[in-house]
Image (spheres, rainbow, N blue to C red):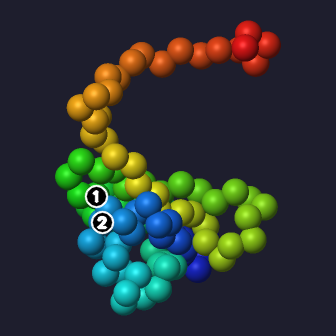
Amino acid sequence: MDEGYVVAAKPSARRVSRAVGAWIVAEGRHRTFESKALAREWARSASPQGYTLWVQDAHPEDESPADGYLLARSSRIRGNETELPGEQVGVFDV
């Protein structure tokens, strides 16, 4: 894409990262990177300890000016939770 890769910060990313908050204050919710790879690299470098920031492509039918979204999730397990192995279930097995 010649115009670059436009990323929109989602509230989850703003809540966990000071770098994202500073970006929004300085530039607004959207930011243009030269490429998707550079957007992903920035997300990795802006991830605070205990959280993961990542860039997810926008749906092709999404009418937003963004090519992708900056999202966050916690990589922590709460004290009363245990990490269980995943298990797939078929649609008709429910």
The residue under label 1 is 47
Viewer-side residue, 82 vs 59: 82
The image position of residue 78, as x and y in percent, is 28, 35
Of all residues shown, which one is farthest toward the front?
Answer: 80
Name which residue lies at 47% across and 86% down. Answer: 28
Mark 1 crowdedness (10 Å alpha carbons): few <14, some 14-19, many ≥20: many
- The answer to the question of whether label 1 and label 2 lie on touching residues, with beta carbons closer than 8 A, is yes
Viewer-side residue, 6 vs 50: 50
Mark 2 crowdedness (10 Å alpha carbons): few <14, some 14-19, many ≥20: many
The image position of residue 12, as x and y in percent, is 44, 60
- Label 1 residue SS: loop
- Name the image quarter holding residue 15: bottom left
- Label 2 residue SS: loop
The residue under label 2 is 17
Name which residue lies at 29% across and 34% down. Answer: 77
The image position of residue 40, as x and y in percent, is 40, 59
- Examine the rendered structure and indicate whether residue 84 appears above or below residue 9: above
Q: Is residue 68 visible?
A: yes
Q: Quadrant of the N terminus?
A: bottom right
Of all residues shown, which one is farthest toward the top?
Answer: 93
Indicate which disc, 1 or 2, sits on the residue closer to the N terminus: 2
- Examine the rendered structure and indicate whether residue 6 appears above or below residue 49: below
Name which residue lies at 53% across and 54% down. Answer: 56
The amino acid type of the residue labelled 1 equals Ser
- Examine the rendered structure and indicate whether residue 18 appears above or below residue 90: below
Q: Quadrant of the C terminus?
A: top right
